[in-house]
Structures are given as C-alpha cells and as structure tokens.
C-alpha cells in the first residue's frame, strides 16, 4: 500500500531543499551496480599499490578526524551545518533525551518506510509520558521533512498521521530502503553542505539486517558523506583508507569501554594503531585471520592507519542503565 505522495508534494519538498535533481522524473540510480570485472580488478590493484606507497610514506596518507563525543554526550550535533537524522524500520533503542537532542539539532529529518511507524510511536510516547530529563528537553519534536521507501511497511494510521509530510516512493528492489534513502538525501546534503548522517539503528535484530546496514556504509562512502549507526549502547561507522584520529570521551577511557575494528568484505593488508590497549602494527586483517574485537583504550586519542576500509564500532554508554535511572521515582 503506497501512501498518497503526488508529484506536487515531492517537487515542493525538493524545491524547498534547493534541488531539482529528481524533478525530471528520472528513476533513482541503482546503488552499487558492479562494474566490469576487469575494471574492478584494475581499480583494486591501483588502490592497493597507491596505499602501499602511502603506508611507506612515499605519499602522505589522507587524514581524518573524528569526535564521537559530539554525537553521544556533548553537543549532540555534527558539523557546522548540522546533520541528517534517519529513522530505520527498527525499534528505537537510543534514550529519548538523546534522540530528542539529535533530532532538534538536525538540518534534515527522514524516516525510511516502516521507520515512520516507529517515529510515530516515539512522538506519541513523548507526548503521553514526558518523563523528566527536563521534560525530554523542554520542546516539541520538529516535524519530519520526508519519508522514503517502497512503502510496503508503513501503516495507514502512520500515513494519516504524517499526511502533510512529503513522501518519496523508491520502488527499486535491487537496493535496501536505507541505501535508497541515502541516495535521495545526498543531493540535498551537497546543496546544504551537510556531511554527516545519524541513523537510529538496532543491533539486536536479524543478522542479515545488521549486515545490510553495514553494506550501506560501504555503498554511501564519499568524502562529503559520513554515516553513523547509533544503537542503544554503541556507535559504528566506516574508516576509509588513510590515517584516522578518534578523540575518545575521557569517561569511556576510564571505564574501559569496548571498541572494535572489523575488516568487513575484504582484507586490510596493512593496519597500524596507537592508543588502544592491544595495538596492531602493520597487521593484515581479515575474517579467518586477525580481527580486533573486545579491545579498549590506553589513551584519549586513538589513531588508526589502514590501507583498506574497516568498520569501527565503540561502546557508547550503558544507555539502558541511564534510562532506568531516569525512570526512578
């Protein structure tokens, strides 16, 4: 069942976003279409050679700086121009006050298909419960900007609840609704100079859903697009080839919260870290070989230098414990 999402509504949303990319009715490009095998091998070989030169410091590696504290305990805002918030079709595990602050500071707010059902429930829960934390940050929730998806999960009640919200139908079955939502959002992000996407993500669900979300991190990787998966007690994002400096909140260091580096999808031939309790030194990482799980920190600054994509995941806070404390009379 597809909601009423006439072209006039969609075009009005795109105009407000300053974009005409979808106005000509073109079908969304299928994200992740494979290139010719020979081209793919040439690209990988060229990249590997280039990064061997970089890791030998013939060419300086590209540098990245990350401050996850802005996401989980300090500003609740990423980037000078704000971030994008995305609600997937999973239960929202992040505490209400964290969700509300991230939502308030977002520049664009999107629900993906059945994620709009979960967002409707969240909005109604906040209106009905108002459980402390300064009455969940003292302000009504800003409205959704857009709902995307193939609309096989959104309910009629939710369609009616968000009847004034623009809806963009993305029927392509060769990509997940999450991947297609990022494709819809990226032109708007480029026009507004927004680089960061915060996704409310559930790690307790089916493994194939979790892996599909990680796959979207790979498909959406661009220099001007960073996607963060935020769950009830963790933050996960992609580290591209280069040298990464991650500033760890001090209380996560003192409490020895966990972190991990995972070479999902392909081997990393040369990984070096500092600032971890168990560091790597020019290590090859791959499934069936070395992976780094249940690691923790020795300092406030972690550096990771890699010649291939890695998934970085870190324990944030015991959000569930904090939520129980909030609910105490």
Image: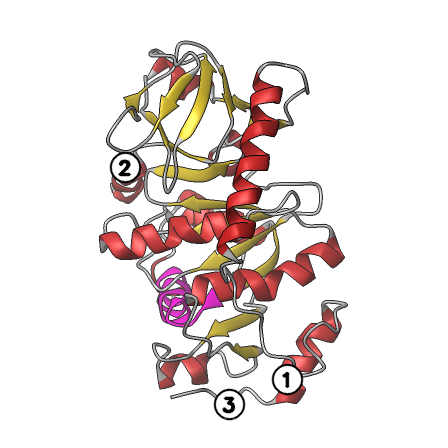
Q: Secondary structure at mark 3?
A: loop
Q: Label 1: state its secondary structure.
A: helix
Work out whether residue 283 or residue 186 is closer to the camera in this orientation and state it.
283
If you read the primary sequence from the N terminus, does the residue marked by circle 3 or circle 1 appear first? 3
Q: Would residue 305 be visible to someone looking at this image?
A: yes
Give the prevailing secondary structure in the magenta stretch: helix
Of the pair 8 and 305, the residue shown nearer to us: 305
Q: Secondary structure at mark 2?
A: helix
Query: Marks 2 and 3, Cα distance to the nearest angstrom?
Result: 42 Å
Segment colored magenta: 110-126
Cα separation, mark 3 vs mark 1, equals 9 Å
Image point (46%, 16%), residue name: 272
Where does label 2 land, which residue?
325
User: Which quarter of the image is occupied by the N terminus?
Assistant: bottom left
Magenta highlight on residue 111: yes
Query: Would residue 277 appear left or right of 51 to someone viewing this image?
Result: left
Q: Earlier in the sequence, mark 2 or mark 3?
A: 3
Residue 9 badge: 1
């Amino acid at each position: 069942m597809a909601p009423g999402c006439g072209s006039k509504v969609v075009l009005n949303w795109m105009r407000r976003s300053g974009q005409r990319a979808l106005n000509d009715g073109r079908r969304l490009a299928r994200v992740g279409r494979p290139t010719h095998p020979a081209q793919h091998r040439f690209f990988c070989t060229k990249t590997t050679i280039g990064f061997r030169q970089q890791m030998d410091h013939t060419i300086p590696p590209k540098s990245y700086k990350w401050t996850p504290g802005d996401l989980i305990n300090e500003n609740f805002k990423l980037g000078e121009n704000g971030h994008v918030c995305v609600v997937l079709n999973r239960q929202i595990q992040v505490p209400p006050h964290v969700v509300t602050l991230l939502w308030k500071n977002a520049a664009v707010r999107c629900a993906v298909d059945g994620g709009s059902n979960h967002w409707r429930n969240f909005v109604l829960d906040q209106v009905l419960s108002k459980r402390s934390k300064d009455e969940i940050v003292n302000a009504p929730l800003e409205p959704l900007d857009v709902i995307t998806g193939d609309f096989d999960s959104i309910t009629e009640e939710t369609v009616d609840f968000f009847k004034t919200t623009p809806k963009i139908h993305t029927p392509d079955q060769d990509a997940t609704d999450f991947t297609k939502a990022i494709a819809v959002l990226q032109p708007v992000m480029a026009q507004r100079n927004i680089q960061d996407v915060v996704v409310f993500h559930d790690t307790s669900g089916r493994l194939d859903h979790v892996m599909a979300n990680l796959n979207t991190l790979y498909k959406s990787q661009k220099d001007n697009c960073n996607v963060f998966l935020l769950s009830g007690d963790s933050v996960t994002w992609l580290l591209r080839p280069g040298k990464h400096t991650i500033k760890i909140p001090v209380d996560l260091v003192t409490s020895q919260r966990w972190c991990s580096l995972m070479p999902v999808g392909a081997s990393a031939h040369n990984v070096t870290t500092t600032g971890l309790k168990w560091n790597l030194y020019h290590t090859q990482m791959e499934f069936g070989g070395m992976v780094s799980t249940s690691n923790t920190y020795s300092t406030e600054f972690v550096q990771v230098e890699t010649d291939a994509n890695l998934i970085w995941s870190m324990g944030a806070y015991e959000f569930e414990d904090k939520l129980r404390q909030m609910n105490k009379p």
